[in-house]
Image (spheres, rainbow, N blue to C red):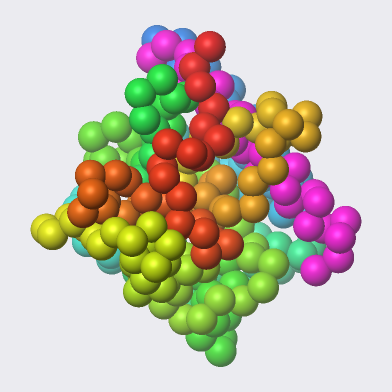
Amino acid sequence: MSRKKVTARRHEHRKRKLERAARFLVGNLVYVVLGGAILLFAGVVIASAQHIPFSAASSQSPAQTSDGWIRLTSKSPSAIIAAARKSSLFTADRSGNGDYLKDLSHLENPVLVRAYQPAGSVPMPDYYVIPIDNAAGSVVGAAELELNKPHTAIQVTAIVTYSAPRPHGYMARVNIGAAIADVSQQRHAHMKAGATAMLVYFPVDARLQEAGKIVWNGGGEYPADPIWLIPGTDGSNYIVGVDGIARHASDLPIMKQP
């Protein structure tokens, strides 16, 4: 992928992070009133970013509710995928010449990616992420499905194209075995008995990042590029980034609430 495209994608990811933060900082009443306008704006942004004709990307599926949410009939992989396919981003015409994904027929099982948000951080939603394979079985993109608070409905907020294919079944760039080994070798801690490692993303402080005051290359800035959170035997939570560095979760450059 060209440097220009990589830069454009980074700017788009940062824009989406700020939009998510703004949406969750406003009150629930304001969110309901402006929900339609926000959804329409998101459609414009995503359609522009993926060069999909806006007339196709903005058409609302009859199964989509007036508030933009698509209800889940269950939490089974098939039910989540069925709900995602009702989204306008899945029903858009992808037969053009843009650099967006043309084939959305090869979907892997959805993966739950939680928002890591310690006290004082900007609130963010959890997501289901559906890896998208090419005909050869490699993961070439992913659909980001925002979850409502009770995890009963979704919105497909983006379909991301990865800069390089990933092995089938490996949406995260670091596998769980390697992440646990990194914590053990670098932090001399093991995963807490009975605990479960989680895929997470976090609200990076994009303002400091844009200003050059922080440099973050560890991933986890958006749901389709998650990182591992591993509870340690020493009582600490560790984050293993895509750079293979095991960090204390408290060291993440997280955006704080004003």
Q: Residue furthest left?
A: 194
Residue that appears at 65% across and 32% down: 206
Q: Position of residue 184 (x, y in %)?
A: 34, 65
**Up-down: is 233 above or below 236?**
below
Q: Quadrant of the N terminus?
A: bottom right
Q: Which image quadrant is residue 91 in?
A: bottom right
Is residue 79 located in the magenta-colored stretch of the structure?
no
**Up-down: is 1 above or below 45?**
below
Is residue 5 located in the magenta-colored stretch of the structure?
yes
Residue that appears at 41% across and 42% down: 249
- Of 115 and 187, nearer the camera is 187
Q: On the rendered structure, is 209 left or right of 58? A: right
Q: On the rendered structure, is 194 left or right of 199? A: left
Q: Is residue 112 visible?
A: no
Q: Position of residue 200 (x, y in %)?
A: 40, 49
Q: On the rendered structure, is 114 left or right of 159? A: left
- Of 258 and 103, nearer the camera is 258
Q: Which image quadrant is residue 210 in?
A: top right
Query: Residues in magenta?
Result: 1-28
Q: Is residue 93 visible?
A: yes
Residue that appears at 57% across and 53% down: 219
Q: Position of residue 22 (x, y in %)?
A: 55, 21
Q: Position of residue 154 (x, y in %)?
A: 37, 43
Q: Residue furthest front?
A: 188
Residue that appears at 41% across and 73% down: 178
